Amino acid sequence: MKTILFSGILLLTTGLYAQNKGNLSIYWGWNHSNYSRSNISFQGIDYDFTLQKVRSHDRQSAFRADTYFNPTQMTIPQYNFRVGYFLTDNWQLSIGMDHMKYVVSQYQSVAIEGKINDPASICQGDFNGEEIVLRPEFLLLEHTDGLNYGNIECRYFHPLINKEKLEVHALGGGGVGMLVPRTNATLFNQERYDEFHLAGYGLGVVTGLEFRFFKHFFIQSEAKGGFIHMPDIRTTASKSDRAAQHFFFFQYNAVFGFSFHLKSKEEKEVN
């Protein structure tokens, strides 16, 4: 039955055709993110340890019009920005920024392995899987300014409805990018560190629906997931202090934007 239903949908939509080639699209919107548990390793002159299966969450900004729609405040919430160009009627190449926020949850119990001989730490000694409770005086770790995933994606758009005033497209694709987080970290109650730093890379896939009105304005609902690997996270002002982690992420995105046609040299000559 599923095969018959899928085949029927393909037959109904195969004949639809959308003229997208040469269109430039720009969108802005917001995301809600989830993250898998992660092992986080810390290295410095007097310590080398790993916290295992650390839980985390995102940080949503309270909805206020002045925060979400004021141009001077719009980068505070978790946002998505993307510019895409249609190479063909179906294929789009785009660049974008997924500004997520990642917060290590406080007062959780985690296993620790390694050693800490730093006199500033409340935990000292050698560890082999013992449980500790994460407290602010031991560690605060947040990528909240933010977990910045700048990426390039290739997306395929398949028309489902093609009317004069309404077009509906299913979309899917994937991409690769870099992680440049502004990590807020306080390790062993030292001075807080908060600087942008190229920390690693990410891979992602996306699927969604686009509703386009009057050929130019659109809203999109997206589900996006992927893998982030950051082997070089700065945690203090000292360059000898580093952290590393990798995890999976999942986003729910709601975005809006507009598109317009860029005339090619041949089109300009014809006109």
Image (tube, grey):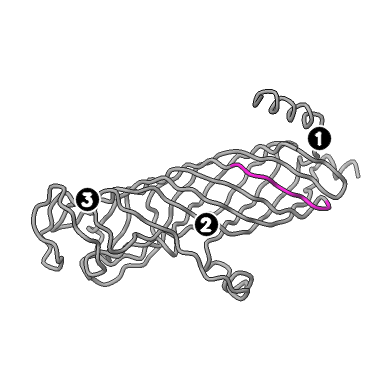
Characterize the local packing of mark 3: few (<14), some (14-19) or many (20 or more) Cα atoms within 10 angstroms.
many
Q: Give the range drawn in magenta.
A: 207-214
Indicate the position of residue 108 as horizontal and vertical percent values. Answer: 28, 59
Structural distance between the alpha carbons of marks 3 and 1: 54 Å
**Residue type at the position of mark 1:** Tyr
Total numbered badges shown on the rendered structure: 3
Q: Does the magenta stretch include residue 199?
A: no
**Residue type at the position of mark 3:** Thr
On the image, which quarter does residue 238 sit in? bottom left
Structural distance between the alpha carbons of marks 3 and 2: 28 Å
Q: Give the prevailing secondary structure in the magenta stretch.
A: strand
On the image, which quarter does residue 240 sit in? bottom left
Q: Which secondary structure lies at badge 2?
A: strand
Q: Residue furthest front?
A: 1
Question: Which badge, 3 or 2, is on the more N-terminal residue?
Answer: 2
Q: Which secondary structure lies at badge 3?
A: strand
Which residue is label 3 attached to?
50
Indicate the position of residue 164 as horizontal and vertical percent values. Answer: 88, 46
Characterize the local packing of mark 1: few (<14), some (14-19) or many (20 or more) Cα atoms within 10 angstroms.
some
In percent of the image, x 25 and y 49: which residue is there? 52
In percent of the image, x 66 and y 37: which residue is there? 156
Which residue is label 2 attached to?
32
Q: Is 133 in front, or is 158?
A: 133
Which residue is label 1 attached to?
17
Which of the labelled discs sits on residue 2, or is there none?
Answer: none
